[in-house]
Image (cartoon, rainbow, N blue to C red):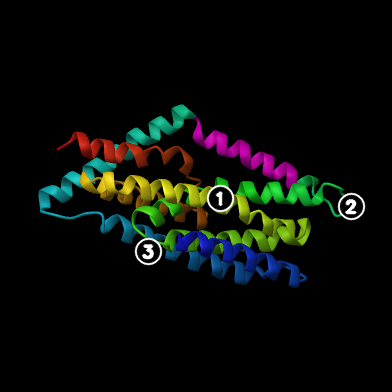
Amino acid sequence: MLGTYLNIIGVVLGGLMGLAMRRPFSERLQLYLKVVLGVYTVWVGMKITFTSFGGSFWQIGKQALILMLAIVLGHLIGRLLRLQKGVNRLGQVAKQKLAAAKPDSPTRASDGFIAAAILYCAAPLAMLGPLQDGLAQNFQPLLIKAVMDGLIAMALVMTCGWPVILAAVPMAAFQVTVTRAAQWVEPMLLDRALVDPVNGICGLIMVSMALIIFEVRRVELADYLPCLAVAPLLAWLWR
């Protein structure tokens, strides 16, 4: 669970920096951080995907086809389940809480805490990161989330106060639960050689996430989360 520990540290450091700073980072520095974060996200995502392939040329082609089919079917399931719309509704709740968190508001602290908790937990990396941490002992996705959440904490703490930092507690509880669940199912997936399809999908979703960081395209990432279940199912059926 190293990734979750790094994520907590990121939130705490970001919050403390926000309390100490009088103004946010300059636009130039924000742009630099965005570029570095986007490039690192692409690199980590491609590394996870490519290392999930192995075997002969035919086997690699089969694995790639399974991932493509999983993306199509999983996205369809996600849209039917309206996952992205649910995440968008949570985002609206966070937006309303932030709008209500004025300096003279008696609910400023609670509004900031709720908004921060939603933003920390509703991001796709809140699922992908702990999953990778549990299945592959790979902390890098949560390291990326730690930087993102730290920047969020830095910005929110200036208007909502120190309770934004405490929102790391429900975030940690959620991510530890996902990591423990992944560790529990890992032996069963390893026995059936089904870990690689899950890793491959995680990597592809992370690469897509870079499109959002670079503001190239708004990708509905939550709708692709069912791919994580579809990929190993297809790999198990296609033997």
Q: Which residue is mark 1?
A: 173
Q: How far apart are the two marked residues, 1 and 3, measured between alpha carbons?
A: 28 Å
Which one is in front in this view, the residue at disc 2 or the one at disc 1?
Answer: 1
Which residue is at 70% across, 56% downward?
164
Q: Which residue is mark 3?
A: 43
Q: Where, by quadrant of the figure, is residue 153 drawn?
A: bottom right
Which one is in front in this view, the residue at disc 3 or the one at disc 2?
Answer: 2
Q: How far apart are the two marked residues, 3 and 2, measured between alpha carbons?
A: 44 Å
Which residue is at 51% across, 51% downward?
175
Residue 108 highlighted magenta (yes or no)? no
User: In this rendering, is residue 83 above or below 56?
Assistant: above
Check contact, mark 2 vs mark 1: CB within 8 A: no
Q: Which residue is mark 2?
A: 104
Residue 86 highlighted magenta (yes or no)? yes
What's the residue type where badge 3 is placed? Trp
What's the residue type where badge 2 is placed? Asp
Callout 3 secondary element: helix
Residue 221 can be seen in this image: yes
Q: Earlier in the sequence, mark 2 or mark 1?
A: 2
Q: Residues within 10 Å of mark 2 (few under 14, many from 20)?
A: few
What's the residue type where badge 1 is placed? Ala
Place of residue 124 in the rendered image (x, y in percent of width and height, measured from the top left): 49, 47
Q: Quadrant of the C terminus?
A: top left
Q: Earlier in the sequence, mark 3 or mark 2?
A: 3
Which one is in front in this view, the residue at disc 1 or the one at disc 3?
Answer: 1
Q: Where, by quadrant of the figure, is residue 41 drawn?
A: bottom left
Q: Quadrant of the N terminus?
A: bottom left
Which stretch did the figure color magenta? Answer: 82-98
Q: Where, by quadrant of the figure, is residue 149 drawn?
A: bottom right
Check contact, mark 3 vs mark 2: CB within 8 A: no
Considering depth in this image, is 198 or 34 the residue closer to the camera? 198
Place of residue 128 in the rendered image (x, y in percent of width and height, measured from the top left): 43, 50
